[in-house]
Amino acid sequence: MKNLIAVFTLFICSFVFPQKKLADVSLLTLEGNKVSTESITKNSVVVVALWSTKCPPCKKELNNINKIHEEWKMQTGVPFYAVSIDKKQDASKVVDMAKKSNWSFSVLLDQEKKLRKALGVWTVPLTLVIKNNKIVYRQIGYSNGAEKQLFKAIKKHTTNKKYASL
């Protein structure tokens, strides 16, 4: 019984006290090249969104972000990465969706679920603002207009004071 309570407590704490540092794991580009999370977070602020082709709110979020992504990038310089958690056998679906949607941001693959496991992610969409490899903002799920709150978090944590006041 004590072990069950301890496991339950750790499970709950993973949600109450989210991981503050992004784990360094290998992901794949749509072309099949390896990229590490450490390399994509080398900028002071980045946005990472975990998603799946089977998740309608994920697709809606990414499509809505795509509509304003270029403006965000011009104003803040902050890169955006959409990380698919789909299985390896579904990689062609991810590639097809990214091309068909004409997304202007980078799409990466977490086929081995390394990032998902390191973050303790049970559901998507999950969108993170990462500053100096630390998670400073976490948005779970998606509802219309959530991208406005996300952009506020991006501006709040940008290192360029010119952009922070926008």
Image (cartoon, rainbow, N blue to C red):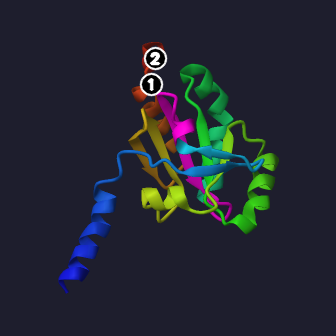
Verify whether residue 69 appears in magenta.
no
Q: Is residue 140 visible?
A: yes
Q: Quadrant of residue 157?
A: top left
Characterize the local packing of mark 2: few (<14), some (14-19) or many (20 or more) Cα atoms within 10 angstroms: few
Q: Which portion, as a residue range, is magenta? A: 38-56
Residue drawn at (47%, 44%) of the image: 128
Verify whether residue 49 appears in magenta.
yes
**To which residue does mark 1 refer?**
158
Where disc 1 sits, the SS reads loop
Q: Quadrant of the N terminus?
A: bottom left
Q: Which of the labelled discs sits on residue 100, or is there none?
A: none
Percent of width and height locating residue 166: 47, 18
Mark-to-mark CA distance, 1 and 2: 6 Å
Closer to us: 39 or 102: 39
Amino acid residing under circle 1:
Thr
Amino acid residing under circle 2:
Asn
